[in-house]
Image (cartoon, rainbow, N blue to C red):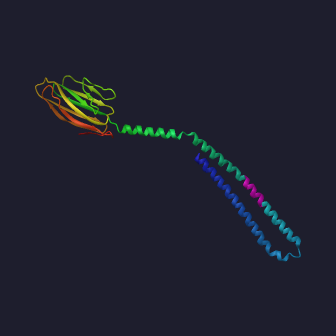
């Protein structure tokens, strides 16, 4: 559409220049005839017919140039009509495009992408090498405590994924899109059966990498120490408190 409009504007400019050139040529011809004829006027007193003939020739020349200029003006009407039609088509196209809808849709998509970038998955895993039954507990920012007996909560996509009742084993909690706030990770010695203490190791995995948890030593049934507190900020970053 823009290319066609530029081409038609160019045609208008060409026709406009032709009209100006023609007018300038006509004016130049008139002046040239006047200059050539001027020296003869003082000597034409005894020949009125010569003066009349010269005036008639000049008038005919002027009339011919005027007709050409009028014809050129008629030709100029055509590109003007084309330009007007093109402008009407452009206005119609602009009216048919739902600019507001496109802008709103684009903004919504941008906001959705921004929200996704600000979210992160969080996976917490612990493991131990003894025959004991060790449990993982996670408390989220809303106070929900996830463990083997409370695997999910309404309004949250997080879930307690894996429970082992006898080691060596591991337990896993996962939140596909972790909410903002502080989380607490606990290890609980549910049942002690091995003679030696259990060393609990673990990690926090998220979209930007992995955070190793400090080792925790469990020696007796009922021990439930806090391993770490971690935070998810409004940009989806995860860090230990």
Toward which corner of the image does residue 189 lie, by quadrant? top left
Toward which corner of the image does residue 34 lie, by quadrant? bottom right
Residue numbers of the magenta segment: 65-74
Percent coordinates x, y for residue 176 in the rendering: 33, 32
Q: Nearer the viewer, residue 88 or 78?
A: 88
- Is most of the magenta stretch helix, strand or loop? helix
28 shown above or below 237: below
Percent coordinates x, y for residue 214 in the rendering: 19, 36
Percent coordinates x, y for residue 200 in the rendering: 18, 31
Q: Quadrant of the N terminus?
A: top right
3 shown above or below 67: above
74 shown above or below 204: below
Q: Quadrant of the C terminus?
A: top left
Asked if residue 199 lies left or right of residue 149, the reply is: left
5 shown above or below 234: below
Report the number of numbered marks.
0
* Residue 23 among those drawn in magenta: no
Q: Which residue appears at 37% of the width and 37% of the height?
A: 116
* Residue 70 among those drawn in magenta: yes
Percent coordinates x, y for residue 197 in the rendering: 12, 29
Residue at the front extreme of this rendering: 143
Q: Which residue appears at 48% of the width and 39% of the height?
A: 104
Toward which corner of the image does residue 109 lie, by quadrant? top left
């Amino acid at each position: 559409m823009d290319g066609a409009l530029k081409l038609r504007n160019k045609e208008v400019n060409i026709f406009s220049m032709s009209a100006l050139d023609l007018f300038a040529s006509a004016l130049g011809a008139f002046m040239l005839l006047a200059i050539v004829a001027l020296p003869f006027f003082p000597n034409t007193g005894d020949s009125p017919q010569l003066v009349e003939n010269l005036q008639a020739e000049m008038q005919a020349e002027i009339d011919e140039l005027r007709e050409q200029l009028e014809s050129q003006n008629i030709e100029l009407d055509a590109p003007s009509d084309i330009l007007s039609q093109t402008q009407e088509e452009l206005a119609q196209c602009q009216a048919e495009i739902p600019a507001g809808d496109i802008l709103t849709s684009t903004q919504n998509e941008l906001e959705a992408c921004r929200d996704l970038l600000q979210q992160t998955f969080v996976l917490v895993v612990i493991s131990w090498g003894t025959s004991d039954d060790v449990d993982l507990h996670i408390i989220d920012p809303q106070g929900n405590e996830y463990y083997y007996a409370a695997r999910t909560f309404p309004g949250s996509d997080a879930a307690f994924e894996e429970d082992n009742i006898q080691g060596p084993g591991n337990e896993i909690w996962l939140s596909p899109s972790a909410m903002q706030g502080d989380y607490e990770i606990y290890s609980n010695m549910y049942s002690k059966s091995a003679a030696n203490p259990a060393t609990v190791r673990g990690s926090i995995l998220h979209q930007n990498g992995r955070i190793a948890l400090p080792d925790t030593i469990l020696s007796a049934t009922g021990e439930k120490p806090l391993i770490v507190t971690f935070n998810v900020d409004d940009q989806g970053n995860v860090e230990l408190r």
